[in-house]
Amino acid sequence: MLPLLSLLLVLLLVAINNACAHEREINIGGLIDGSSQLGKEQEIAMKMAIQDVNLLCSNCSTKLTLHLRDSHGNAAQATSSATDLINGVKVEAFLGNLALPQAALVSDINNCSTETPFLLLSPTAVALPQVPSPNLIQVANDISVHMQFIAAIVGQFKWRKVTAIYQQKNSFDLNNGIITLLSDSLQVVDATIEQHVAFPPISPLGSPGFNIEQELAKLRNNTNRVFIFVQSSLELAICLFRKATQMGMMETGYVWIVSDEIASLLDSVDPSVFFSMQGVIGYKTNFIDTSDTFRTFKLKFCQNYGAIYPQDRNSNPSIFALRAYDATWVIGKALHNQQGNVMSQVLLQNILLSNFNGLSGNISFRNGELAQTPTFQIINVIGKSYNEIASWSPTLGFSKKIPRQIDHGSNPAIDFGNDMAELGPIYWPGGQLTVPRGWDLNMVKPLRIGVPACGAFHQFVNVTLVQNGTEVTGFSIHVFKAALKYLPYPLPHVLVPFYGDYDEMVQQIHLKGLDAAVGDINILEERYHWAEFSQPYVKSGIALVVPTKPDDTKETWMFMHVFEAKMWIIIPSFSLFIGFVVWLIEHGENPEFGDGSFSQQIGTVFWFSFSVLFFQQKESLKNNLSKVVLAPWFFLVMVLTANFTAALTSKLTVSQIVPAAKDFETLRRENAVIGCNRRSFTCSYLENVLHIKPENIKHIRSIDDNPEAFQKGIIEGAIFVTAHANVFLAKYCKGYATTGPTFTFGGLGFAFPKHAPIVLDFSRAILKAIEIGEVEKIEREMLSSFNYSASATINSDSPILGLRPFAGLFYICGGAALIALLLTVLPLVKNRWSLSYTQEALKIRGVFSLLFLLLNRSSSGPNLQQLKQNSDAKSDDHVETRAP
């Protein structure tokens, strides 16, 4: 019996050995950075995933074996370890925290560009300049989404400049490309990167404190106070925040924003770390942490982590641990779909076709990276932890709700908005609840503000030497000081005289030679290449000033220019019509109108029509109807006379002067010499825009040199900025005037560095000074210091009187005369004439004779009778001629 049992036991062992011989072991390579919190979590997650995959596929013929290597944060070690795993261990797939350029190099060196799949566990997915190999798969979201979120935060709080901080982990990091992405995203919200600072890797055995302190000291001396961790390890951030706290850079006015790579790991740090991070805001990738699957994973993860790293504190696995776990499952599922037939090309294809819901979210790939669009939780460090204050999606913007239950592969059904105004309080560094402005001028050195020392118009900026240095006064300086009163903060500054031209002074702002420039600086498009400008405090343009001379030709016929030409036709025509109507009414009853021959009657009509214009008529009126006609006409004549007298008096009072030259085109055509301020842009404007020959451009040093140049005939015109022209005409108001069109420009303003936050505040301060009338008061005081009379601008002639102001009176007069005419003529036609009599009169005298006979009804009885007898005689003759 015992031999039989022994034989059965041997047969059983042989069967077990045969079964194990058929089970194939598949090697998976893994690479971590064991010196970082990120690497430790990835190590635990990958080991747990291998166990779960093998447990689930216990009946399969394959078994996954994880060969893990630790690079200790060394790029060379990481490359060497990856090469050993591919060539030495012959792994079927590789996953680990390798940068994409580094993975591409390892893949090319080992000739596995189309064979071994690389699943890269970097915090963000970046793009290479060239198209990467299809076997390089990044289990992360596109970094451009991260940059969009940072830009959204910056734009939301209206910060204009930021400082980007990143860690130069190795030579394979694409930091320059990341900075470019951030810069492009910030341009959308009208912001820019003022400075970017790179920190070296932190060695576990080294002390990075001195280098961090040195770099932070440089940042503290700048004006910008918005610091963004674009790419950095948690370990560097902890060291940096501790040093920043010691240096007073975590106080009121500072802004610190940390990336997903840091914020997602804050659940694993010691509470003492939060003490040096008070007020920091950050963002972390959202995932579902309420499911039973996650709770089970979290429990096992914390147990395993505590067993391996008992000295560390860890409460929750981060998104990076979840992705490492899911990436391992991607390989396990792909192998399971191959039914144990391990072929690299088929394995890679199955990995790329993966589509399942993992712990970190939906796992599917597009363009070599995760296809799912992430949602970020915005956190605010306060006390011994942090608060989740909002959520953000690249497609839906900000939301006060924190999405928990998300249908992976689709956008969360949450009411996202674009405004964080109602998202509750944010505690900024120093305990401040109001949003920091993002910059600070409380520097060791005050701002060096340049002022033009060689300007032609000292009324705007006047630099004088005094015992203790220089004194700067003038209209522009007074406006600057007025605006300072309305700034919401003090502005320590010193005015520095600049002895170059205006363009050079503005360029010095770009070259860091000056911090700003104040004066009568014209806002020009080309100067925007070097600086930004405040709101203009005075309108500006280009005006031509020329000498004046009397206009003798206009004085000779000046009275003709009071009325329009058609008025000189309408007035006498209307007066003649009124005179004719009055004559018609008065002719039969008034001998003063009815005596005389036909030609004398015509003369009477014309003389009465002319004399009535001056109220000098001698004829008396007998008929009331005539008085009704003349009454409105007298009123109209009185109004016309009063207006004519006033307009003519005005023209006689103001001397009629004309410009010596009409405009720029006239001067250019005559090759006349034009003067301009030698340090102003007007000289180049004359040559390049108005096409004045260089030899016809005369540089003038000072405003007082222009009159002498005019008198000596050196120049025939002078070009000024309109504000300067007003000063010149106020000082020399006789004999000069502006003429021709005025070319408008941007105005006079103050220059600041490009994207300087102070520009907006200073513009508001200038607008405040303008609105309350302070700038106008300063300008009025400047001009009142001269004997300033009326404006010396040559305008067109005074407005000429036309028909429109008097049209109503003309209608009344014309209507009254027309009614009177009808009342007079219609009864005569009805009572005095028959058709034959009318025809006979037309045969003898024509129309005019008929009219004369009609009007001469009272004294023409014999004539009419004679005409009638003649008519009857002719009728008898006709009858006798026709008799047979």
Image (cartoon, rainbow, N blue to C red):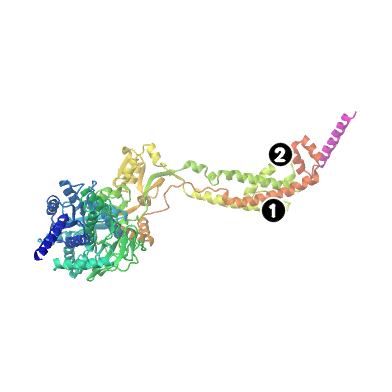
Number of residue marks:
2
* Residue 448 image offset from top left, x and y in percent: 23, 56
Label 1 amino acid?
Val
**Magenta span: chief secondary structure:** helix
Seen as rendered, the residue at the extreme bottom is 383
- Residue 877 belongs to the span the image colors magenta: yes
For the C terminus, the quadrant is top right
Residue for point 9% across, 66% down: 2
Query: Is residue 771 or residue 826 the one in the foreground?
Result: 771
> Above or below — where is 253 with respect to 523?
below
Q: Is residue 838 left or right of residue 12?
A: right
* Residue 654 image offset from top left, x and y in percent: 47, 49
Return the residue at label 1: 628
Query: Is residue 468 or residue 360 the one in the foreground?
Result: 360
Q: Mark yes or no: residue 415 visible.
A: yes
> Above or below — where is 166 with respect to 296?
above
* Residue 607 image offset from top left, x and y in percent: 66, 44
Q: Mark 1: which secondary structure? A: helix
Q: Is residue 537 left or right of residue 258?
A: right
Badge 2, how many Cα within 10 Å: few under 14, some, many 20+?
few
Seen as rendered, the residue at the extreme top is 884
Label 2 amino acid?
Ser
Q: What stretch of residues is rendered in magenta?
A: 861-884
Return the residue at label 2: 599
